[in-house]
């Protein structure tokens, strides 16, 4: 009996390695068939590159980076495979938070005191790192919402929010609006739910160089299935929806050393107030 158990254990590691190799090859073949050679090669490069980075992080060297979401400290963040391209120093090896998640987490650590003490805070498509920090501090006032996920408090379409007018004091909408077809309708709904004194915290990736919004004909598999890539003309959408806005960036809240240590990018968060 003991010998059989030992035999099974001795085969478990080779089986796991074989299974991982087959999964890697299968993923590469699917990418070649659907997206072409470049995304397939990027996927392989990121996979093996991250193996090297994990080994490098085990060396007894001084830490350069620190993840605020989980407390991990090490020499390098991992690569992030974004299908059409990849990012360096992006993913925490421990909790898997990306640079945007670390930025959102730190933003609300600083902003928590400014959230009104009464009224609901509704968080659409909640990021687990941010949600795990806000829920213990806000209690029942913190409400999560999503159209597809079953684990949230409220099933809601951003273009038809099932809440009464002025029901919320704050809305958190990160990386959602660029998936919503009727974005102007969604912004109008958010304005309605906030009433006259609330605040909307909104983030979308913006095109570089001040370029206008790029609308895709269908969800783009090379851009995380977004249906558009916003430019700074999103400010006009805010104005039409009855918001005045301010853009908060990591550089406006943290010094150079903190930005380097936490591995933050240049993305900003829009603070939108009813006009």
Image: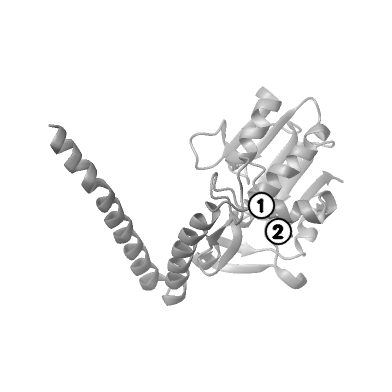
**Number of numbered discs:** 2
Marks 2 and 1, the one that precedes in the sequence: 1
Q: Position of residue 250 (x, y in %)?
A: 78, 53
Residue 118's place in the image compared with 217, above or below, is above
Label pair 2/1, CB-CB below 8 angstroms: no
* Residue at the spot 76% in from the left edge and 51% down from the top edge: 258
Q: Name the one closer to the observer, 105 or 126.
A: 105
Q: Secondary structure at mark 1?
A: strand
Q: Name the one closer to the observer, 145 or 189.
A: 145
* Residue at the spot 22% in from the left edge and 46% down from the top edge: 10
Q: Nearer the viewer, mark 2 or mark 1?
A: 1
| Pointer 2 residue | 265
Specify whether 133 is left or right of 233: left
| Pointer 1 residue | 65
Q: Position of residue 131 (x, y in %)?
A: 62, 36
Locate the N terminus and report the quarter of the image it occupies.
top left
Specify whether 77 is left or right of 116: left
Q: Secondary structure at mark 2?
A: loop
Colour scheme of the picture: one colour
Label 2 to label 1: alpha-carbon separation: 14 Å
Q: Position of residue 75 (x, y in %)?
A: 61, 55
Q: Name the one closer to the observer, 271 or 160.
A: 271
* Residue 269 appears in the picture as rendered: no
In the current view of this chain or complex, which residue is farthest to the front?
A: 60
């Amino acid at each position: 009996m003991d010998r059989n158990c030992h035999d099974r254990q001795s085969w478990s590691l080779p089986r796991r390695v074989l299974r991982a190799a087959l999964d890697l090859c299968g993923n590469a073949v699917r990418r070649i068939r659907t997206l072409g050679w470049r995304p397939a090669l990027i996927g392989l490069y990121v996979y093996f590159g991250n193996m090297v980075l994990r080994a490098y992080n085990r060396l007894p060297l001084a830490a350069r980076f620190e993840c605020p979401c989980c407390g991990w400290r090490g020499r390098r963040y991992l690569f992030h495979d974004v299908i059409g391209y990849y990012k360096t120093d992006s993913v925490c090896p421990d909790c898997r938070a990306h640079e945007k998640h670390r930025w959102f987490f730190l933003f609300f650590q600083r902003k928590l005191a400014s959230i009104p003490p009464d009224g609901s805070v509704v968080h659409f498509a909640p990021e687990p790192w941010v949600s795990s920090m806000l829920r213990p501090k806000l209690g029942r006032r913190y409400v999560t919402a999503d159209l597809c996920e079953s684990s949230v408090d409220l099933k809601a379409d951003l273009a038809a929010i099932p809440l009464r007018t002025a029901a919320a004091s704050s809305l958190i909408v990160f990386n959602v609006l660029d998936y919503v077809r009727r974005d102007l309708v969604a912004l109008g709904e958010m304005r309605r739910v906030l009433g006259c004194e609330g605040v909307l915290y909104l983030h979308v990736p913006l095109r570089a160089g001040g370029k206008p919004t790029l609308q895709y004909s269908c969800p783009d598999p090379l851009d995380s299935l977004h249906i558009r890539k916003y430019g700074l003309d999103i400010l006009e959408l805010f104005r039409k929806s009855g918001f005045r806005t301010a853009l908060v960036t990591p550089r406006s809240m943290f010094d150079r050393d903190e930005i380097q240590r936490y591995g933050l990018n240049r993305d900003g968060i829009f603070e939108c107030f009813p006009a």
